[in-house]
Amino acid sequence: MKKLLLSLSFVAFSSLSFAQLWTSQATGFTNASRGLEEIQIVNANTVWALAYDGANTSNVIQEFTKTTDGGTTWVPGVIDVGDTALGINNICAINNTTAWVSAVNGTDGTGSVVYKTTDGGVTWNQQNPAGFTGAASFVNFVHFFDANVGFAMGDPNAGEFEIWRSTDGGDSWTLVPGANIPPFLSGEYGYNGGNIVVGNTVWLPTNKGRILKSSDQGLTWTITQAPLTDFGGTAQSGRMAFSDVNNGCILKTAGTTYTFYTTTNGGTTWSTGTTFTGTRRLLNYIPGTTTIVATSAAAPVGTSVSTNNGSTWTDLEPGGTEQRGVSAFLDLTTGWCAGFSSTPFTDGVFKLTGPLANSNFESSTVFAAYPNPATNLVTISSEGIDAYQLSVTDLTGKVVLTKSMTGIENSVDVSSLSNGAYFFTITSDNKKETIKIIKN
């Protein structure tokens, strides 16, 4: 069965330009429109990133790029996994020389492999001669916590989720006993590269809306039900992120409806869902904080931030053509965001240089819009601002209404708009906020 990548992919439609929040860096790929589907930060200097074809996402791309000087220079490379038809699921690096990748056939599990490099990606060697060889094997990802301890996880096979563990850097592997893994549901599977790791804890979402979790480096596992039916389906899907071993969030998508959930116990239980008020939907935490960065390579593109765990959002960049893909952060001062390459010397990735580098950065919401959902009128109120501009856009980015307003409270007639989601962008001399409104 074909497995969709959990991370979102977008087609490159323009070269990216500089912005105050991010500094453009060249990933070094010779092919234009190389995007990054995963960014792995080892430390402030060393970062690995896995590539995909932004011009045609169905193409198999076995490439990575790496920096060892904080992004001043990026050096691309090829990941030779012995078969050019195998798609690379994920990449896991522990330093500037050592990394692992998992790879699999895109339509079935034939050829599922784990490969390792110890020379910075110049050469890659297969690591699992005894694992993932069954007809039903389908590796989802590989992760190493240090130079010795790691595991590779796949779909159910022979009556259990197939999980192989190593304590010698991948030289040998032991199958995790079925007694250590909860039973799977009929037709259940994980997603390629869908794992999230914080310290010794790892989470893997499945197509049944469940979350496999291990807190002891993959030795024993539990499973819980998330507040959705599928993490990667067409009717419903979800993106999960964690700030630490306890605190995390899920953004659920069902058509044009977006619902936001949080957890404070590592995903055992989740809050009652609330309407997601952000305008960008690729979410990632600044580790150990309540700050979530949201990026988007689809309209409205750009970057937003929440400093209160998703309760309110501030757009840090106006919508435009500056596509922002997946992001990764070491801390409040160091992070990268995916872009698309133009030439070997132009673009491809962005390094954080703007407001998030200030640990005192805070978002303050001064506008409110209600009721939400709305049928006829939406009231906009403000705190201390009595003149501002309103721009209303639909999900495609089309502007459907603009209006100049004065006074601390105004009503907007939305009765003529079609039912669906709209973004109310309110701009004053020194403040800009976007509020998502559902029109019923």
Image (cartoon, grey):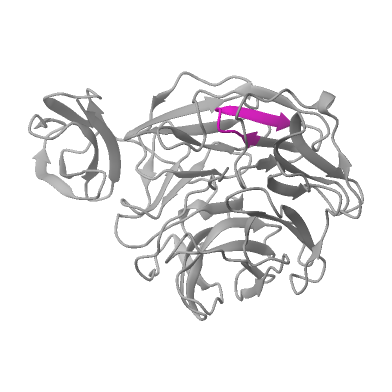
Please name the predominant secondary structure of the magenta segment in the image: strand
Q: Residue 243: x percent and y percent?
A: 61, 38
Q: Is residue 309 visible?
A: no
Judge whether 413 appears above or below 131 on screen: above
Name the side, left or right, on which 210 lies relative to 165.
left
State the image coordinates of residue 153 (x, y, percent, origin top left). 73, 42
Residue 145 appears at what percent x and percent y? 80, 47
Q: Residue at x 51, y 53 (%)?
A: 326
Quarter of the rendering containing residue 439: top left
> Foreground: 290 or 440?
440
Whether residue 396 is visible here, answered yes or no, is yes
Residue appearing at x 48%, y 59% in the figure: 58
Q: Quadrant of the C terminus?
A: top left
Does the magenta-highlighted stretch encompass residue 211?
Answer: yes
The region drawn magenta spans: 204-214
Rendered position, 146 above or below 271: below
- Tell me what residue is drawn at x 40 percent, y 69 percent: 18
Image quadrant holding the N terminus, namely top right
